[in-house]
Image: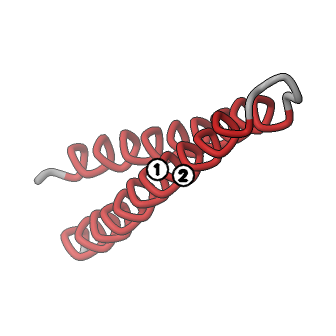
C-alpha cells in the first residue's frame, strides 16, 4: 500500500469510528426517552432496554475493531516510512 492509500484508509476509519460513536449517543438518547415514557406498557420498556443493550454491544464491538485496525494501519504506515 502506498502512503496515500494508508492515509485515506486512516481517514475513512476515523470517520467510521466517529459515526459509530454518534450513533451510540443518539440511540441511547432516543431509547432512553421511550424507557422514561410513562404511557408505554412495561413489556415495551423491558424490550427497549434489551434492544438498547444489543445495539450498544454491537456498536461497541465495531468501534473496538475499527480502533484496532486504525492502530495497525498507523504502525504499518510508520514502518513503511522508515
Q: Disc 1 on helix, strand or loop?
A: helix
Is 21 placed above or below 35 here?
A: below
Pick the front one: 4 or 64 = 64
Q: Quadrant of residue 16?
A: top left
Pick the front one: 58 or 47 = 47
Pick the front one: 75 or 62 = 62
Q: Position of residue 23 (x, y in %)?
A: 57, 36
Q: Position of residue 15 (x, y in %)?
A: 47, 39
Q: Position of residue 45 (x, y in %)?
A: 70, 39
Residue drawn 77% across and 37% down? 35
Q: Quadrant of residue 25?
A: top right
Residue that badge 2 annotates: 56
Residue drawn 23% across and 52% down? 3
**Local crowd at mark 1 within 10 Å, few (<14), some, or many (≥20)?**
some
Q: Quadrant of residue 24?
A: top right
Q: Quadrant of the C terminus?
A: bottom left
Q: CA distance from mark 2 to mark 1?
A: 5 Å
Residue drawn 36% across and 39% down? 12
Residue drawn 65% across and 38% down? 43
Number of callouts: 2
Rendered image: mark on residue 76: none
Is 67 placed above or below 17 here?
A: below
Which residue is the extreme one toward the left?
Answer: 1
Left or right: 28 in relation to 56: right
**Local crowd at mark 2 within 10 Å, few (<14), some, or many (≥20)?**
some
Which residue is the extreme one toward the top?
Answer: 39
Rendered image: mark on residue 59: 1
Name the image colouring. Answer: secondary structure
Left or right: 18 in relation to 46: left
Dot 2 and dot 1 residues touching (CB under 8 Å): yes
Q: Disc 2 on helix, strand or loop?
A: helix
Q: Position of residue 38 (x, y in %)?
A: 88, 29
Amino acid at each position: 500500500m502506498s502512503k496515500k492509500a494508508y492515509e485515506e484508509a486512516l481517514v475513512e476509519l476515523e470517520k467510521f469510528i466517529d459515526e459509530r460513536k454518534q450513533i451510540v449517543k443518539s440511540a441511547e438518547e432516543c431509547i432512553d426517552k421511550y424507557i422514561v415514557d410513562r404511557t408505554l406498557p412495561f413489556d415495551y420498556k423491558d424490550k427497549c432496554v434489551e434492544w438498547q443493550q444489543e445495539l450498544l454491544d454491537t456498536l461497541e464491538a465495531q468501534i473496538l475493531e475499527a480502533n484496532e485496525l486504525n492502530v495497525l494501519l498507523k504502525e504499518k504506515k510508520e514502518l513503511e516510512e522508515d
